[in-house]
Structure formats: C-alpha cells, structure tokens
Image: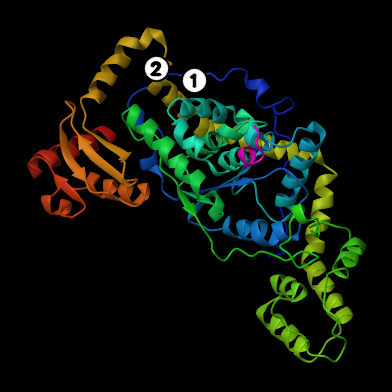
Amino acid sequence: MSDEAMPLPVKPPAGLACDAVSQAGRPQYPVPAGKLAAFPHSPASHMTTRVLTGITTSGTPHLGNYVGAVRPAVAASRAGDTESFYFLADLHSLIKAQDPARTQRSTLEIAATWLACGLEPDKVWFYRQSDVPEITELTWFLTCVAGKGILNRAHAYKAAVDKNNADGEDPDAGISAGLFMYPVLMAADILIFNAHQVPVGRDQIQHIEMARDFGQRFNHVYGREYFTLPEALIDDNVATLPGLDGRKMSKSYNNTIPLFAPRDELKKLVFSILTDSRGPGEPKDTEGSALFQLYQAFASAEETRAFAQQFADGIGWGDAKQQLFERIDAEIAPLREKYEALMARPADIEAILRDGARRLRERYATPLLAELRHAVGLRDLSQQPVAETRAAAKAALPVFKQYRDTDSRFYFKLVDAEGNVLVQSNGFDSPKDAGKLIGVLKRAEQADAMETPEIVLQVPAADVLAALAALREAEA
C-alpha cells in the first residue's frame, strides 16, 4: 500500500449547504436537441475503460476487507487508461439494514475508510448512490423491460425461497420486494454510466449477466444502443485473510480484526490468533498457518521469505505474533491517523460525496436520463411531431435482435424494417460472445468480413452490407 499522502478533504462547495437531491427538486430533463447519438456519454464515445465498483455500506471494515478489496481497488484507481467510479451503495443496504442510525454511521465509516486508504476524489468519481436520483428513475425504466422469470432465478431470491420451502413456509415468507428487485437496481448502477467492467466475485457474475440482459432488452425495444453491455471483471487471485480462529475472516464468524482498531486493541487481537501447541525451538509449518498468511498479506516477498525461515527454525509463537503486529501496524498506523482525522470532520466527507454526485450528474446522469426519457416517450408534448418523425426514421432501420432459445444457448439475428431476417447466427454459450460478433459485423464493409461459420446470410451479402451501412450512418 502506498504511503502517499491523501489530499486534504475539500471544503463544502458553494451551494451544497442543503441536500443535493432535495435542492434539485424533481429532476428536469430538457428534450435533446439535434441527433440523440451526439451525447458525450454515448457508448461509442468512450475513450477509456470505465470501471465501476460498488461499496457495501454495512458493518465496520476489517483487515480482510482492506487486503481483499480496498487496497487493490485504490491501486487500480490510479491506472492511466481507466475512468473509475466508486459509489457507496446505501440504497442497497436498506434491503437488510433497517436501523437508520447504524446506516448513517456505517456510511460515514466506509467513506472515511476509502479516503484514508488513498482514494483521490479529484481523480476518480466517488459518490453516494442515493445522491444520484437518476439511478432510481433508470431502475424503473429497466424494471419495465426486465423479465420476471430472470428475476425469479436470482441467487439471493432463489436461496430465500428454497429455505422457506425447506422450512415448510410460504415460498415468499419474509422476502421483501427489495430483495427481489435488487438485480434491477444493480443494473441501473452499472448502466447509467455505461461501465465497461465491474469487478465482482464469482457469486456476483449472475448480476452482471442480468445487467447485460436488461440493457440489451432496452436497446432492442427502443431501437438503439443506449447502453454499453458490461463485463464482469473476475480476479481469481483475490486475497482472502484468515480470521482469529483460522477460518475466513468474516463478520459472520465473529473472528475479524477491525481495520482501524486502536494500536493496543490491535496488538491484543493479534496475540489472540489461534496457533498450535508447538513451543519455541520446534519447527513450524507455514502452510495452513493463519498467522503466517496474515503476515504475508502485509510483507514484501523478502520479508515473507525471512519469516518463513524463522518458522523453520522454530520461532516462538509469541515472537511471531509480535512481528506480525509490528508489520500490520507499520502499514495501518498512518492510515488510522488519516481515518481518525476524517471521522472528526464528517461535514467534509459529506461535502466530498455531494460534490462528486453533483459533478457526475451534470456530466453523465442528467443528460442520459434526458435521452432515455425521450426514448421511452416521456417528452415535451409541443415537440411531438418532430419526435414522431424521428421515431419513424428509427423504425425504418434494420436492427440486431439477441435472444435465448429453448436450448439455453444465445442467438442473434439482423432483421430489416419489414421483419425480414437478413442474418441468422448459430448458438453461443454466453451473450457476451454473441455481442462480440455483433460488434464485428457492425464494422463490416466487405463481404469477406462476414465470412464466419457462426452466422448464415439469409439474403445476398450486398443487401446485408447495405443494411449495416445504414446502421452505421444512423449511429454516427
């Protein structure tokens, strides 16, 4: 972890004395002028990779959160070819947390943690989900195209139903609509900024696939690629730390070491780590040792090798724990100092979050919602004739349609304005693979660019190329 000093929190910007959402009132979305595709947030205009990270706002951060999520994410935020979005998912937290004071406190603690650990709000987008009302409006737009059957298969909802069935309860007993609709809100979080990649664990891949599905459905229904289809960014080498009892560090096991525990408490917790009964002078195994794994997460390769040699030489557990404590504290102490200073100035953290949301809304969210409101027909009635002309022109264009067939494979076809199929694909194992080939076809200007066993032309190649050219011209 870099010891680079974190910039001092900004002072509350002018105009942020009241709530950022309420001061805006009901969002006003002007009808877009000129070509709708000219908006700067359009998928085609992305010059860098957009990476969006959602941050859970429940619970107190512990060392496992820091090593597995915070530290690598902050490091990744400094990549020069990436536009990074980090948001506090406080709306999501309401599904489980219904203690208002605790929700507020957790949000403050999590925000202070990321800032103390080096997240730079002047170089990345750092905002609170509830400060961007366009997200909730987009959630409704997506709800209107989302398939209920897909939501029925969401892991969290299905697990809750299965548990109720096993217990002999009504299938939906105790299940809120919030839990059921969670994937749609998550999709809105991602699609509103046309994120390319979303770092998630393997258990969250389904949510990214749902976001792709909802975005594709909206694009298809309203006849244009309003949304980039995101990809899950999986790191199979994500570090997981053992807790005090040797199991994975987790609040569920009550075996965590709080990230910013005072120095004396940190030392006490480190010395309580479970070890075996081998005494000083007896060689000790590094494999399976919670103490060694914790040390390795904070030490350099050279320090780790030296510590491993001490294990082989029979270091006493007390000495090993003292070295572990000193190594952790050497990295955490400067961050702890920043964290405590930030926690003492909650108004500055509030200002940072509101300012981030305000700038993000101005640049991306408000223009996008103006475009989407126009797309779905929530328009200025005085401009209806012009809008209908545009809609008729759009309807005359060919369109790619993606779908999942009864064999559970993913297909697409290119259809002209009369519904005639121009291109039919073979089946793909994932919608992402189908989408990649669609992207290749859209750029095709010669017949040989369409030579692939994955598709079958239903009309002469010249007709297909003409249709693709019309699509490119409309999206230019």
Span of residues in magenta: 163-169
Quadrant that contains the C terminus: top left
Total marks in image: 2
Q: Please, what secondary structure does the residue beneath circle 1 have? A: loop
Q: Which of 211 and 2 lies nearest the eye of the viewer?
A: 211
Check the image and tell me how it is coloured. Answer: rainbow
Q: Position of residue 142 (x, y in %)?
A: 47, 29
- Determine which residue is flagged by label 1: 29
Q: Say if mark 1 contacts mark 2, CB within 8 Å.
A: no
What amino acid is found at the position of numbered circle 1 in the picture?
Answer: Tyr
Tag shown at residue 190: none
Q: Position of residue 12 (x, y in %)?
A: 73, 35
- Determine which residue is flagged by label 2: 377
Q: Position of residue 324 (x, y in %)?
A: 81, 74
Q: Residue at x 83, y 49 (%)?
A: 341
* Residue closest to the far top: 382
Tell whether 124 sits left or right of 262. Answer: left
Query: Does the magenta run of residues contain 164?
Result: yes
Query: Does the magenta run of residues contain 25?
Result: no
